[in-house]
Amino acid sequence: MRCLALAFTFTVALTGSQPAQPVADPLALINGNVVNVRDGHITPNATIVLRSGRIASIGSAAAPAGVKALDLKGKYVLPGLIDAHTHASDLAAFRRALESGVTTVRSAGVSHYVDVGFNELVKKGAVAGPNVVTAGYHVRPQIAPEAFLGDPQYADLLSGVTTIDKMRRAVQMNLSHGVDWIKILATERAGTADTDPRKQVYTEEEIRAIVQEAATKNVPVQAHAHGDEGAMAAVKAGVRSIEHGTYLSDATLREMKQRGTYLDPTYTTVIDLREAGGDYDLAALRIRGEHMLPRLRDTVIRAHELGVAIVTGGDTSYGPNSLTRIGQEMTHFVEIGFKPLEAIQAATIRNAEMLRLEKSIGSIESGFEADLIAVEKNPIDNITTVQDPLLVISNGRIALDRLEFGRKAGPL
Ligand SMILES: [Zn+2]
């Protein structure tokens, strides 16, 4: 995986952090092989017309007269990828996500509501994307203290979010900033050396209060949970997704299947934990990664066999030293037994369903957002191709275009 990460380094160096150039509107994408992520069917030589940030049409007709055309030269077209778990927190980081083919991210906790602010920039057209499904501050016993610089009326939470009343107030604080999701800590973290990821943090009753408070604004809850007891409590309390899920038992997975709770295993980031470099680079965490990775691998395999809905999440900040990418997560899913189409769905339509955005993103259909990527090979036969997008379009704007490079390259 490390050598593949170099491709991203190259991509980022190539385009830097300049804003995406507005494209001709409408724009026709011609000669692409379009992947239907619902059934894996591929429409060859398709013409996709983009207009006002949406997919206006898709079919076999030639580009309408007078509409600028971009020749995809037989490349394969997929919906933009979805990252259900990011900690990206500055413009360059969001740009790196975009250039890796990710056109929608769900925040899993950041400071100063930069997820909300960045998404406003995307909505205004100041930057191409990715769109951000926001979550604000992670609700946990000790909320990051800078939260209260902007919200001094919640200063009572500085001493700890340890009662149900305070948990409800922590949710309210986030809701007042217009977040789309609430993120909670159901077990301790894995990425810090002095915490035990198996240890439960909040009880079922406490999490239920958080879920109910969020539901007053129709906002779902994502629960960070490695240990089984904390995860089961979160599932029974009604969270919509379990993040990580390393030590989940079959009983918890069956409960998730029955309730329709999503699993976002962030598998690739545990590989990062185990290896030198990347977001996590501590000897103690490398040792932890050695024993967590086989457990998480076993959990994902059992979850897949039991039919739990699984989505892709990076759990990365997309910082300059971050290695984890959604293309890698898809590749690893295939390595551990998913069909390539299932890995593609985890990053597209399944993820969109979890976000309750399946009517506007996650598939290439007329009326959907113009979020697309083009890759060199058929991803159904070569899943690794998704790690190297040659074209990224987000909200109808070209964010990355490498179609002209390597035209004469032969097969690998
Ligand atoms: Zn995280």
Image: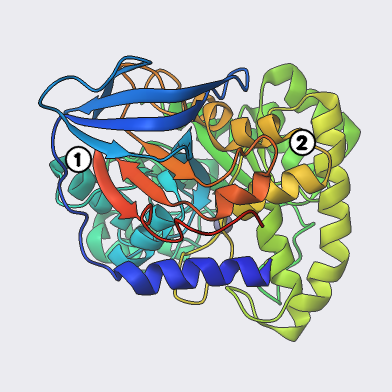
- Give the image quadrant in which the ligand numbered 1 is located: bottom right
The residue carrying mark 1 is: 123
Instruction: Name the mark on residue 72.
Output: none
Label 2 crowd bin: few (<14), some (14–19), many (20+), radius 10 Å: many
The residue carrying mark 2 is: 232
User: Considering the numbered disc 1 on the image, is that residue within a helix, a strand or a loop?
Assistant: helix
Is 287 placed above or below 340 here? below
Query: Residue at horizontal 86%, vertical 29%?
Result: 305
Task: Locate residue 330, reporting x and y percent.
Answer: 65, 45
Query: Residue at horizontal 66%, vertical 61%?
Result: 269
- Kindly indicate the quadrant of the structure image that contains residue 404: bottom left
User: Considering the numbered disc 2 on the image, is that residue within a helix, a strand or a loop?
Assistant: helix
Query: Residue at horizontal 76%, vertical 72%?
Result: 274
Task: Locate residue 182, reporting x and y percent.
Answer: 46, 41
Q: Is mark 1 within 8 Å of ligand 1?
A: no
User: Which residue is the extreme one toward the bottom?
Assistant: 283
Q: Is residue 126 left or right of residue 229?
A: left
Q: Nearer the viewer, residue 132 or 138?
A: 132
Residue type, label 2:
Met
Foreground mark, 2 or 1, reads 1
